[in-house]
Image (cartoon, helix red, strand yellow):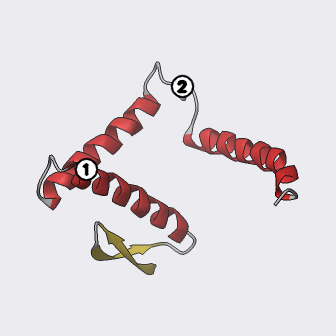
Amino acid sequence: MIQLDVSIMGQAYKLACREGEESALREAVAYLDEKMCAIRDAGKIKGNDRIAVMAALGIAAELLATKSAEGPFADMTLAEINQKIAAMHAVIDVALAPQENLF
């Protein structure tokens, strides 16, 4: 296990993860930090525990929407979604490559 020092809403945390999962954990921390800071900055909710619950509810709703029978990803596994995203990135990289020569 690897220990990572991270910050969520300015609060330091030491988290553990398996080797090779550091990037995914850092991405999750950044996403959560973004959601919690947005809720805090809106100024309607006070208290870190309430902010954390509201962020968790928002993230859970996002997850459930992707699993919805009517959702755009209803018939796909997470691995298939990740493959589609990687393919889109590859197409974008190819399309933007000529632009790099302009700068």
- SS assignment at label 1: helix
Q: Which residue is drawn at 58% across and 71% down?
A: 20
Measured along the vertical axis of the image, is residue 83 above or below residue 40?
A: above
Figure quadrant of residue 33:
bottom left
* Residue 25 on image: x %, y %: 46, 65
* Residue 45 on image: x %, y %: 14, 49
Answer few, some or many: residues within 10 Å of disc 1's Cα (few below 14, many 20 plus, some between 14 and 19). Answer: some
Measured along the vertical axis of the image, is residue 67 above or below residue 83?
A: above
Residue 7 is left or right of residue 75, and the answer is: left
Q: Residue at x 54, y 29 (%)?
A: 73
Figure quadrant of residue 80:
top right
Nearer to us in this view, 87 or 18: 87
User: Which amino acid type is shown beneath numbered disc 1?
Assistant: Ile
Quarter holding the C terminus is bottom right
Of tags 1 and 2, the one toward the viewer is 1
User: Which amino acid type is shown beneath numbered disc 2?
Assistant: Pro
Residue 58 is left or right of residue 72, and the answer is: left
* Residue 41 on image: x %, y %: 25, 54
Nearer to us in this view, 71 or 36: 36
* Residue 4 on image: x %, y %: 42, 78
Residue occupied by mark 2: 72
Q: Which residue is drawn at 22% across and 46% down?
A: 54
Q: Which of marks 1 and 2 is nearer the N terminus?
A: 1
Nearer to us in this view, 75 or 32: 32
Q: Residue at x 88, y 51 (%)?
A: 98
- SS assignment at label 2: loop
Numbered mark located on residue 39 in the image: 1
Tell which residue pokes out farthest to the front in this image: 103
